[in-house]
Amino acid sequence: MYKIIKKRILNAAGTTLEMVVEAPLIAKKCLAGQFIIFRLDEYGERIPLTIADYDRENGTVTIMFQPVGRSTMMLAELNEGDSILDFVGPLGKPTHMEGLKRVAVVGGGVGCAIAYPVAKAMHAKGIEVDMIAGFRNKDIVMLEDEMRANSTNLFITTDDGSYSEKGFVTDKLKQLIEAGRNYDEIVAIGPGVMMKYVSLATKPYGIKTVVSLNPIMIDGTGMCGGCRVSVGGETKFACVDGPEFDGHAVDWDELLRRGAFYKDEETEQKEHVCRLTGGVRHA
Amino acid sequence: MPNMSLIKNPMPEQEPLVRNKNFLEVAKGYTADMAIDEAQRCLSCKNKPCVSGCPVNVQIPEFIEKVAEGKFAEAYEIITSTNSLPAVCGRVCPQESQCEGKCVRGIKGEPVAIGRLERFAADFSRENVTEKKAEAKIKPETNGHKVAVIGSGPAGLTCAGDLARLGYKVTIFEAFHKAGGVLVYGIPEFRLPKHIVSAEIENLTAIGVELITNAVVGRAMSVDELFEEGFEAVFIGSGAGLPQFMNIPGENLLGVYSANEYLTRINLMKAYLPEYDTPIKKARHVAVVGGGNVAMDAARCAKRMGADEVYIIYRRSMEELPARKEEVHHAMEEEIIFKLLNNPISVLGDENGYVNGIECLRMELGEPDESGRRRPVEVKDSNFVLDVDTVIIAIGTSPNPLIKSTTEGLETNKKGCIVADESAATSRKGVFAGGDAVTGAATVILAMGAGKMAAESIDKYIMCK
């Protein structure tokens, strides 16, 4: 069992949560860009979440998530002191940082929770980091202080202009590139569609763009092949070959389709969470 | 006077058209009377050809003699003196090519049903003999030496059990949330009920084996770190978990699964039970590509999940099907449709990316290839399309590269299998390996045999240090 040490709501709308979980084995080894898989209880699915932060000394791992499916909705119902049945990791390859001098890290919505630790790790290595964080509106803006403290420059955009600059992250990114910010690399992390558009936006400039994919998977160790993704015409397993890939080589349409494969089943399950269990299952 | 019947006592089974709609065990097991009757067919040969066919050296005539005398608990004791997982072996071993394949009674008529008797003795003991079990569970005296076992499949469990019985302090590291490896994620409930696997694992923890789940060696810790933590030897029994695909067009369409994924969703993640959250698509027409035991398991699961038609697509003929005859027979009884001498060349999809067909070519058999099987040759312009909404690829697996890539000096061959000698020793001092991680995908019992050999070698290695 893996105990929840701390729980925090990350934005005004309450749509994104942070949990600090006791997982010493993972905390000892994990690096930015890696993920964990949790299974809430005996009946739960195995759900991958990126490691948002870690504390080696205290043996904790921080996850941030948006309760969107049954498993994350039920996880959100747990409180400090409660435990998660299974928590395994660190999985995937860590973020590649060698030789980078100036990077733009682009986060979209809850993706900022994943983009932020990458920015933090790069910043700590002395890499110049422009962090561009996009949100739909003011109510879901999160981690502003953390991102500011762990980047060289922070740019926040909102789709509706209700906070900071109005516009999409792609607009801001293009603006910075056009203004002559010479990036060695761009890291885009967020919903599939956002990563796709960032990749499309950067392609004409020929700037290497790394994306962090989070497809459907079971084991996270290369065993099920459910997370396969076409990169440059080759099939890769996101769990072991990734989760970070060259955004210009990813077959985005296939990725987005595969991500939505169980949409109908998920909708049905979510209704069950709301109507039947009120959140937590009493097994 | 032995029972001279030329045929085995038949195994009571669920009716095919009933069982292909449920996940209950197909074979119900012998009754005590049947077991005694069958045991009396054994001639107790002095030279014991059957034992030479058993990778874990079960003392077959001896245990069968006890069954014949109705001393089932004693029979079980004899089996477990060399075999840690008898209830599993009695169910999934390919006895026809091992012990039973060497049985003298098989020369004229059917061999003694050794597997069924082993299963009977194990089931009887689990269900009835509580006192004996408590006694068997007394922890052996510890010798103070620590051994790490990576993977809790048949190889790891056997190695761990044998070492624990010798007094070693054994810790098993399992990447999944549940122990058992292929016994829990791969082999379906209807062939090997999971409560039996749990019971066998409990027998091991009862004698002091420590089990750490959710521990991915190669990520959370390396083999070298295990040594740093005080383990004196490491056994790698991480299996062959990496699914192979055909590399044909359309393999990433929606509705194409690896057999590993499909079986894991159903067996480990229990997608067939409503109380579990695991999603799986309702498939109507399913094509399973491949002809091994895994393909049979996937096909029979698909049928049980409610598919109208399930095809096995295999490029050679019935003769070359690598699956056990019994599995093929069961699959056919359950109305799985065999499309033999067909080779898939692409998976077809609709405008939304969902599978709606599989295109195949007809094949014919040519000259034997290096495997001795006749090589399938394409029949020109014989393309046809099978309308299916789900495709399951069951053409084999290879060892997971995670450990190899994080263990310096660990030699592997070009297929990614760890190189180990007959004593299970690898190129790294103190590191032993066995099972599918060494051989590539094979059988439960061969992995157990390797685990057993490794336990012996590890004992020798540590004692001579």
Image (tube, coloured by chain):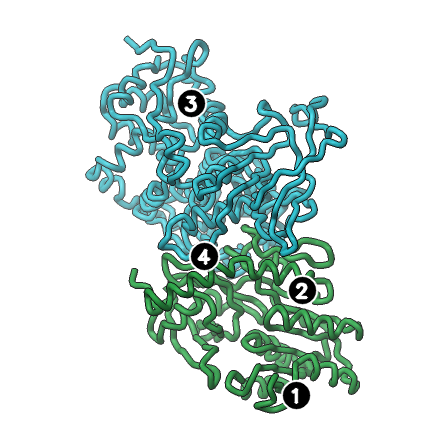
Instruction: Identify the amino acid type marked 1.
Output: Asn
Q: Are marks 3 and 2 on the same chain?
A: no
Q: Is residue A252 above or below residue B171?
A: below
Q: What SS does tag 1 mark?
A: strand
Asked where in the image residue B192 lies, by quadrant, the reply is: top left
- Where is residue B67 shown, x and y percent of the image? 27, 23
Marks 1 and 4 sit apart, C-alpha to C-alpha, by 47 Å
Chain A representation colour? green
Q: Are marks 3 and 4 on the same chain?
A: yes
Marks 1 and 3 sit apart, C-alpha to C-alpha, by 73 Å
Q: What SS does tag 2 mark?
A: strand
Q: Is residue B48 above or below residue B265?
A: above
Per the rendering, the mark at residue B51 is 3
Image mark 3: chain: B
Few, some or many residues within 10 Å of mark 3 (<14, 14–19, 20+): some
Few, some or many residues within 10 Å of mark 4 (<14, 14–19, 20+): few
Chain B representation colour? cyan
Marks 3 and 4 sit apart, C-alpha to C-alpha, by 38 Å
Per the rendering, the mark at residue A153 is 1
Among the two numbered marks 1 and 2 on one chain, the one whose residue lies closer to the N terminus: 1
Instruction: Identify the amino acid type marked 2.
Output: Phe
Marks 3 and 2 sit apart, C-alpha to C-alpha, by 53 Å
Q: Is residue B11 above or below residue A267?
A: above
Marks 1 and 2 sit apart, C-alpha to C-alpha, by 25 Å
Image mark 1: chain: A
**Quarter of the image containing the N terminus of chain B?**
top left
Q: Mark 2 — residue?
A: A245
**Residue under the image location 52 percent in, 83 percent down:** A140
Image mark 2: chain: A
Nearer the observer: mark 2 or 4; the answer is 2
